[in-house]
Amino acid sequence: MKGPSPILICALLLSLFATGLLAQPGSLDITFNPGTGPNDGGDPGVRSMALQPDGKILIAGSFTKVNNMTRMGVARLNADGSLDATFDPGDGIGVGFSILTVVLQTDGKIIIGGAFSSVDGIKRRGIARLRSDGSLDVSYDPSPALDDDLPQIFPSYSRPTASFSSEAGSPRRPETFISPA
C-alpha cells in the first residue's frame, strides 16, 4: 500500500503555515514578501523602522528605491511587505543623505530626523514632519533652530524627543522636547 504523496504533504504543511495554524512566535512569516526591497543607498540602506497601528511599516534610511520605485530615504510597506504606493514622499531627502530615525505620532503624522538639508525640495535641516500620505507637512519647521543632524528621535509622552547638542548656537541637553504643533 502506498502512502500519501510527498507533494500533497508539503502542500498541506505550507497551507497550515500560511494560515498561521502551525506558526510559532518568532517564526518566519511566509506571507511577508518585500520583493526586491530597498536598495542599499548607503551603509546600511535602512536605518529605522516604525510599525503603524494598521500593520503598515515605515522604513527610513539612505536608500533611493524600494521595489524599483523611487523612494528617496523614506517609504511605507503594506503588511504583506509590498510597497504602499499611496505613501509618496515626492523627491524625498535626495541622494547622498540619510534619515536616521522615524517616529510615528499619535495623529498619524511622521517625524523624520537625520542628515539631510531638504525634503521634497523644501529646506528642512535634519528634521521634518510628513503627513500620513508621505507629503511634507510645511506647517512644521523647527529646523532653522537646529545646528546638528538628528541621530535619534524618541517618542516620549506623545511628543518627539530629539538628541542633539545645540539649538540656534546655544548648548542644549542631549535630549530636548520638540513641539509637534
Image (tube, rainbow, N blue to C red):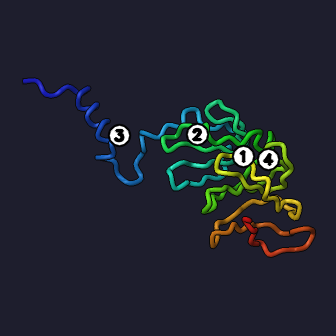
SS at badge 3: helix
- The location of residue 55, given as percent across then percent down, is 50, 50
- Label whose residue precedes the other's in the sequence (2 or 3): 3
- The location of residue 9, given as percent across then percent down, is 23, 32
Amino acid type indicated by mark 2? Asp
**Image vertical order of residue 157 relative to residue 137, above or below:** below
Task: Say if residue 179 shows up in the picture.
Answer: yes
- Label whose residue precedes the other's in the sequence (4 or 2): 2
Amino acid type indicated by mark 4? Val
Q: How many marks?
A: 4
Residue lying at 81% horizontally and 56% vertically, measured from the top left: 126
Nearest-to-viewer mark from 2 and 1? 1
* Residue situated in front as seen by the camera: 103 or 43: 103
Furthest-front residue in this view: 139
Nearest-to-viewer mark from 3 and 4? 4
Count residues near mark 3 (Cα–Cα under 10 Å), then give few for <14, some for 14-19, many for 20+: some
- Residue 119's label in the rendered image is 4
Nearest-to-viewer mark from 2 and 3? 2
* Residue situated in front as seen by the camera: 48 or 74: 74
Residue lying at 57% horizontally and 43% vertically, measured from the top left: 77
* Residue situated in front as seen by the camera: 153 or 85: 85
Amino acid type indicated by mark 3? Ala
Furthest-left residue in this view: 1
Residue lying at 29% horizontally and 46% vertically, measured from the top left: 21
- The location of residue 29, given as percent across then percent down, is 42, 44
**Image vertical order of residue 102 relative to residue 68, above or below:** below
Alpha-carbon span between mark 2 and mark 3? 22 Å
SS at badge 4: strand
Alpha-carbon span between mark 4 and mark 2? 19 Å
Count residues near mark 1 (Cα–Cα under 10 Å), then give few for <14, some for 14-19, many for 20+: some
Q: Residue beneath label 1, please? A: 135
